[in-house]
Image (tube, helix red, strand yellow):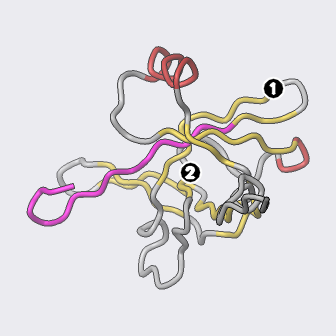
Amino acid sequence: MSKFNAPNSIFSNWDKDLYIANKEKEEFDDYNNNFPTYKKPFFFGKVNYQPLTGKNLEAYMKAFGETQNSVISALIDYTDDGKFKSFDLAYLYGANPNGEKVYGENANYIVKAYKPQNTKIMVLFEEIVKEDNDGNS
């Protein structure tokens, strides 16, 4: 009898690259529309981030409102406290800042919550849905 060898295991998909673009400031255009600017993105490291499901997603929606976007959770060490904060941009699931003309343009998630816990810091990321020029997502 041969042993089953799945092509992917939870351990091979455990730690994934995470890049962060810190929010620098808010600017306003001639029509008083505000838009944030971001600092140069940096490689935060390899992080085990996973999608929220079930009761955790339900609790997120009670706190932040209903969403159809993907919500991701990660726990980071206290030694990394202060490296990023809420409303910074994140590059998850293979997205990276390579080739950006404007910092943050390749980011696919925004940091929605940054909550210190007992021994770790819980970070929640919400997917950024970008529309093309035709208004399609």
Q: Which residues are magenta?
A: 123-137
Report which quarter residue 75 is drawn in: top right
Residue 70 at x, y percent in the picture: 44, 42
Residue behind mark 2:
88
Please report the residue visible at 51 percent of the width from the left and 25 percent of the height from the top: 57
Residue 123 vs residue 70, the one in the foreground: 70
Q: Secondary structure at mark 2?
A: loop
Up-down relation of residue 49 to residue 37 (above or below): above
Majority secondary structure in the magenta region: loop
Q: Quadrant of residue 69?
A: top left
Magenta stretch holds residue 130: yes
Measuring 72% from the left and 34% from the top, which residue is drawn there?
122
Q: Position of residue 51 (x, y in %)?
A: 56, 40
Q: Position of residue 62 (x, y in %)?
A: 46, 14
Work out which quarter of the rendered image holds the N terminus and state it.
bottom right
> Per the image, is 59 magenta?
no
In the rendered structure, which amino acid carries the disc numbered 2?
Asp
Extreme-front residue of the structure? 1
Helix, strand or loop for disc 1: loop
- Say few, some or many: other residues with alpha carbon within 10 Å of mark 1 (under 14 / 14 to 19 / 20 or more): few
Locate residue 132: give its quadrant: bottom left
| Residue shown at 84% from the left, 50% from the top | 80
Position of residue 58 in the picture relative to residue 14 (left or right): left
Q: Residue 117 shows which numbered tag?
A: 1
Up-down: is 123 above or below 6? above
Dot placed on the residue nearer the N-terminal end, 1 or 2: 2
Horizontally, is 89 left or right of 129 in the view?
right
* Alpha-carbon span between mark 1 and mark 2: 20 Å
Choose between 126 and 15: the one closer to the eye: 15
Characterize the local packing of mark 2: few (<14), some (14-19) or many (20 or more) Cα atoms within 10 angstroms: many
Residue type at tag 1:
Gln
